[in-house]
Amino acid sequence: MQFSNFRKEKMIEKVLKNFPTTLYIAKIKINNDSLEIIDFKLLNHGKNTNYSKEEFTSELIKKSIDSNYFKKFAKIIKEKNNKLEIKYQFKDKTGKIYTFKDTLKIIDKKDNIYTLLGLGINISKEEELSQIFESIIDSNHMGIIIYKEKIVFCDNYAKNVLQSENYDLSPINLFPDNMKPLIKDTIQKRLNGKKFSKFYALELPSLKNNRKFVEFYTHTIIYEGEYAGLIILIDKTQFFKHKKMLEIIQNVNSTILTQTFDKQKLLTEIVSQIKSVSYFKDVFISNKKIKNNQFYNLQINDEFLVFEAKYKDDFDELCINTLKKIQKNIQKAIKEINKNLTLIILKQALEQSFQWLLITDENGKIIYVNDAVTKISGYSKEELIGKNPKIFKSEKHNESLYKHLWDTILDNKIFETTLKNKNKNNQIFYLKNRILPITLPNEKKYFVSMGIDITHQKRLEKKITNIKLKDKITELYNRYGFINESKALLNPHKKFALIVIDIKDFKAINAIKGNKFGNEILQQFSIFLQIFFHKNSIISRIGNDEFAIFTEIKNIDEIKDKLNTFMKVIKKIEILSLKLSINIGIAIFPDDDSNIENLIEKALIALENAKNNGEFSIEFYNKTLDTHLKNNIQIKTLIHQAIKEDKFIYHYQPYISTKDFNISSAECLIRIQHNNNLIYPSEFINFAESSGLIKDIEILMAKKIINILKTTPIPLSFNISANSLNDDEHLSKLIKLTKEYANKIIIEITERELIFNTKKIIQTLQEFKNLGFKIAIDDFGTGYSSFMYIKNLPIDYLKIDSSFTKNIEKCKKDLAIVEAIINISKKLDIKTIAEGIETKKQMEILTNLGCDYLQGYYFFKPMGFEELIQNLKNPLDN
């Protein structure tokens, strides 16, 4: 059954009468690209235009919609057969512009005349929001990044700021390494749906190593149906640079104003003030120009103020202009110094005089103040005249001090002291004060107060005190500062953990990579500690490679879990491309001790035990570890007693020549006689070296060897420690004692000491060599060194460690190593001594390989001097 068009329209009007959108029927004619509205009928009024239903005619539509839209509509209608959507803008009765989206259905078509049923929806709000978002996306002032597991959107602004086109990566990579654990946790929370916002302001290098200072505003959003993170970033680099440059200029100008008497002091203080801004990598004074793009030189008379860039683009136009201003100001200041010496002397004299001048009558009422008083106190002269000087009292006013002051001046005596006062704004100022009683001829008394404002000096003293508490390299508390701050935190009702962390092999890192690299490691590690232990923790560097943390805990399990997590993180991260190994010792307050100093010692005892258990070990202090401490004390007492009473026993183990199998020389070995027992070096030598007592032992041994050499036909060897090799005064004593018999003495140094201060060792060994001593390297092959070191050392013997010789009968690798050492030594004209020979087979193999000397139980055990002499008389039976 077919309905007429009129009946269709009536039915639609009835059904959709109360529909919330605009409904209409339009009849249009299309010729080529032009569109003509023949008829228009509004079925349902959406009330979005301020026009009434009756006003809504085809003429109104033509007037309110831009003519260009009709061309677009004509093209779309011709291409569509049935249903289509169009979007257009419409001006309402008041002139406001609205955006509509109409869904059109072609319900009749005759030739080029179309009858359309239209459903119009007001999408103005959505369109406005879309335009706002597009404006943000295209903004030249902020960047947008959206991420899930990886970055899914990054606009051009953000790419330009970070200077990279490669963004198929995790958002974690946008942040510095020390923040990555924290950022990783934050990202995971967002992706799990937790809604929160964060703000970060960071200085970080771009991927092209340019300086960037970026503010990050982060939020949780829903993107493509899933939780995601939104980052709005703003490049504040120029603002940051302007701020830093302004701060540098202000610091320099402030220094110029206060340091005008000594050119060198002025430059030194200016360098210090520029460094305090933390913009350049380094600033220093040089007597010559440094020609390198990384450096910028400011010539100041016959010297240069040298700036080292931290990032590639540091020396931009802003920076160079700032430095030129600084140069101009400094040169002007120095010119004034050189030009006005008389004025400088006068200024110094004035600085040493009293600046504050205040006079009271005999009743203590102020009758006169000079300009310095008003400037320092903040009060006007009118506010002070007639008042009592107690107007300057601080809250912690010392009544007894003022009573003493008053008694003194009433007794016609001069009173001098430093007074802590308050100015009009309740700010503290310090006055070095002298009060003079003056009696005029008319018997009237007055009191003249003359003083110097030393507030700046007091503040400086406070700063210096703070400096004394801080470590220069890491800016953490030093040991003294750590103890001081930890004591202030103590609370007997709370539990604290004192944690000591040791970086394994840091001495080797310093020696191989250099002190500068070592310092950077310490700085990066300290930053990591501050991030990880940031809450309620005092963090310090208490030793060369030891850090201490004092932190409040609920229970032992809590700190165990935290430190286990800490270890896992340390194992995964790299600091300056280096994997660090650590050990940790912990003592608990108040369980282990209530004294901070004692807690540190107990944590260090626990740390030593952790070191013995291997890298990444954690040990809590317990009373059984005290045994270790007591052993150290016993060893210390034993060594002191042995040195004082000369209780050392000397044994000698011969070296056998493979040419004739006779004794060629002997090694002098030291023991301690204690309660009819012999204490061997393995039990005391490490402590002797670390405590410095090894030097006293070496002097005693040297004296003993000299007496022996007077009656012994063969040379003797003895060890000198690394500590001794670095002590010129001690070496001078040894040389003075032994140089008469230098040609009969072999000085042994342990191979592991070669990597530390190698240049110094080469120089020291060469001095010994020049005096006629022979040099041997002990335990070769067991430490860090190689023939790269050996070739540069003036040595005569290499002692092959027993760990290689004991297995040469069975282990081909050990045999190959020993053979290689012997062959290379021969080419370097160095004699070889094999240690630990215990079998005839070992002796035969080493002899056939060309080893020069053998030592071990197969020939002789260490023996007393008389036995050595006897064996010299009786050659070995081969």
Image (tube, rainbow, N blue to C red):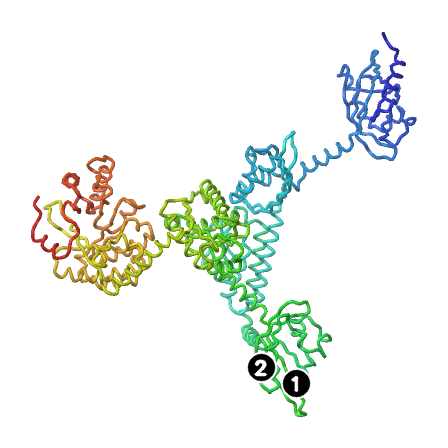
Residue 108: image location, x then y, percent: 83, 13
Frontmost residue, 359 versus 190: 190
Residue position for label 1: 446
When asked about the image quadrant of residue 378, the answer is bottom right
Residue 721: image location, x then y, percent: 28, 55
In the figure, 295 relative to 463: above or below? above
The local crowd at label 2, few if under 14, some if 14 to 19, many if 20 or more residues have their Cα within 10 Å, is some
Frontmost residue, 450 versus 302: 450
| Residue 211 seen in render | yes
Residue position for label 2: 415
| Residue 771 seen in render | no
The reply to whether discs 2 and 1 touch (Cβ–Cβ < 8 Å) is: no
Assign a secondary structure to mark 2: strand
Query: From the image, which quarter does the C terminus lie in?
Result: top left
Assign a secondary structure to mark 1: strand
Residue 672: image location, x then y, percent: 23, 58
When asked about the image quadrant of residue 379, the answer is bottom right
Instruction: Name the N-terminal-most of marks 2 and 1.
Output: 2
In the figure, 688 relative to 261: above or below? above
In the figure, 21 relative to 637: above or below? above
Residue type indicated by callout 1: Tyr
